[in-house]
Amino acid sequence: MFIEYVGLYALLLMTMTHSATMHVSDAAAYPVQLQVWVYLGVSLGIMVLLALHNFRGRLIHLGVVLTVASVVLFNQYMERLMAAINWSTFVLTNNLLLGVLALIFHAFEVYEYSSMISQEAQETMAHGSSIFHKAFFRIAMCPVLISIDFFMTPFGTHVNKEYYQSEFNRFQGPTYIAVLVYVVAQLTNVFSDTLNLYVSVLLTLILWVLGLQLLEVHPTVGYVVPMMRDVVMDVLRFFAFVAPFLCAYTFAYYILFQSVGAKVPPGYTSIPRSFRTTYLNMLGQVDLTPFNELPAPYEYLLGHALLLSQGTVVVIMLINVLIAMMAKTVGDGLKKAKTAQQMAFASCVLRSEKIRGLDLLEKNDGETERCPMMHQHPSWLMSRRQRSDCKLWRTTCTGSAAT
């Protein structure tokens, strides 16, 4: 299930990136996007199809042969394909596939979200237990609940707290809904060029960042993800402390350079520009020309005094405090991060199990039965001894049914 998820998510990233860089036009051609689609898209499609059969040995060899053959074939006929293709149809097809993939991932989130709600609560909210009521709950109510939970994030509370124990879950559902809205807008040409630019850039950025969750299951890199969460919190605490200093120097520079009359430097003509210049000064991008052009002696001395004090207070003191905080977080939190990585790995496996479902064993009379161990542990989380016990139980059940 995880390999299928990775392949589908890679396809989602590829189609979203292509959609952000293409638009429907009779005069436009996108040869680079087509080549990426042909080579990478076909390979990912083969990987997803193989994952449906659990990557058996023969299928892996078949997949390698098909991938190499498709690359050679497309490379041989790429020029003919570019000459024959309708670029508007190519863009529309890419957007349609993007919508289908976003719908699939949204269905994954809905299934995971609903799996953490008890059956009694689902029946209560859907006012029934029939197939129609269950479909209504997942299709209509779950997306609404996910959206409500997302907007309740600033208040620190959620309707489904178990689902939002993962930081990635806070953004996945709303992001996939936004992608669906974006696809509909692309197909109907509702968005203006400016709005389309902002939405496509934002969605592409969010989807690529959300791809970090795929690293949580890696045995040697996965612990870095929870550690980075702690580092991000250190950065947020740092900016909460440094914000008053940035605002103070922003207004000080703005007032100083407004006093020179008509010769106001471009970086200080307004408060937003003054804030940007002050922030860049904190990062070392200092332009001394406006300060050297200040009238002597008072404005000149005041400007350089402000600049030197900013370098001392913000750059030397506060940034070194941030470095010390991050060093302490990384040093003290290494063992904690590895433990959190194991918990994140278990959570990812559990999510895959909930989406995939547990296999049922067939009895002689046609009924189905689960291994008792499966009620306590998902199959991927069981130890080798537990798997052996479950396999022995399955063998015993089969032998009993045969006798």
Image (cartoon, helix red, strand yellow):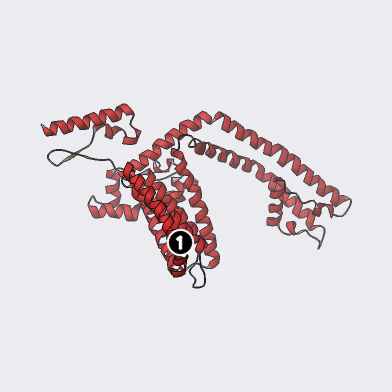
Across and down, in percent, residue 336 comes to: 50, 30
Q: Residue furthest top?
A: 385
Placement of 25 over or under 69, stated as above or below: below
> Is 195 displayed left or right of 278 in the figure?
left
- Nearest the viewer among 102 and 116 is 102
In this rendering, position of residue 254 left or right of residue 43: right
Badge 1 is on which residue?
Answer: 182
Quadrant including the C terminus: top left
Residue appearing at x 50%, y 55% in the figure? 204
| Res. 378 in view | no
Query: What amino acid is labelled 1 in the image?
Result: Tyr
Do we see residue 58 in this rendering? Answer: yes
Q: Secondary structure at mark 1?
A: helix
Is residue 292 placed above or below 384 in the rendered structure? Answer: below
Residue 289 falls in image quadrant: bottom right
The quadrant of the rendering that contains the N terminus is top left
Q: Position of residue 351 (x, y in %)?
A: 37, 42
Q: Residue at x 44, y 49 (%)?
A: 172
| Residue 85 place in picture, x, y as percent | 44, 68
